[in-house]
Amino acid sequence: MLWTPPKLVKWICDDIKKRGFPPPHRLQAEQLVCHALNISRLDIYLQHDKPSSPEELSFLRELLKKRYKREPVAYITGSCEFWSLNFQVGPGVLIPRHETEILIESALDYLSNQKELKEIKILELGTGSGAIPLALCSERSNLTVVSTDISKEALAYAHQNIKKHFNLLEKKDNRILTVLSDRFSAIKPGSIFDYIISNPPYIPSRDIDNLQMEVAQWEPRQALNGGPDGLEFYQYLMNAAVEYLKPDGYLIFEHGFDQVSPISDLFSSESILSLVEKRKDYSKNDRVMVYRKHKK
């Protein structure tokens, strides 16, 4: 049998579906085939009658062995798409999620309302692969983003991605500064920012082992673990907003689908911050909250 790209995609799609792997099955199959054959997704169908070589099929079998161990496809291929940008990822860094694009949309809406500012300073907690600051910088100009992470492994990927998209930053006169830091401990006291933006860890510790195997067994636990109730980092972000945000500055963050009420209760103790907006993700789940710091 001649294994052409479309036949490989169909076989892998059917196989991982039968094995009970999470969807999207066809997209995963296409990504694996493209990586093994070094072609684009469009080439799968442009080269629909081109037989794969024995070497390509052997490489694809090795990729499938990894997938059968529930290793995420993004780790296997070493890359993923987010906000129409390609990011290098691998073990040690959280894979950017489609839902986090709601965080980007929210931040961009507020940034659009402050075009009069010559420079906008943003502080980010937990940058991981650098997906959030790079997505923002792809859309807006004159941004200075200070991105922190506690993980050296994650920051290594952030550095790679910033280097990869350096022309994008230079073209729009943007800067991303990465800082190895336990939360904001390395940020100079007295520093003031226009925005604090974060997709912090928010999974309750007890729930992590019940997540999909691709997440629970492969992705870095410290990028998932939000403490006993999942709210540990929101308490910290609330305090950080009081310390680091300028008056009328914004705190914008992602959260779990069932965390709006407990976060609202938590923030009600800080009168200098007020809730401006809540947003749902593409699945109609609560996903992003925006707070504003009042002038004293």
Image: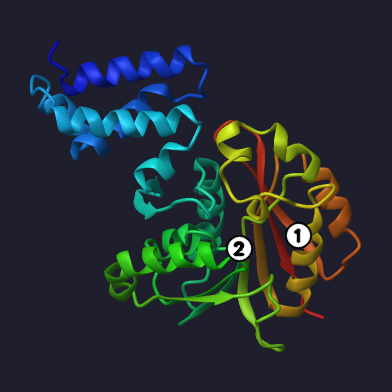
Residue 222 screen position, x and y as percent: 67, 55
Work out how far the residue at label 2 is from the one at label 1, CA to CA, in angstroms: 10 Å
Rendering quarter of residue 26: top left
The quarter of the picture where the N terminus appears is: top left
Instruction: State whether residue 124 is above or below residue 260.
Output: below
Q: Closer to the N terminus: mark 2 or mark 1?
A: 2
Please name the residue shown 62% across and 79% down the image.
Answer: 193
Observer able to see residue 165: no
Locate residue 76 relative to residue 201 in the image: left or right.
left
Q: Which mark is residue 29?
A: none
**On the image, numbered disc 1 is attached to which residue?**
233
* Contact, mark 2 vs mark 1 (Cβ under 8 Å): yes
Residue 182 screen position, x and y as percent: 68, 72
Which residue occupies the foreground of this view, 1 or 277? 1
Q: As shown in the figure, which amino acid type bears the numbered disc 2?
A: Gly
Circle 1: element type: helix
Which residue occupies the foreground of this view, 168 or 229? 229
**On the image, numbered disc 2 is attached to which residue?**
126
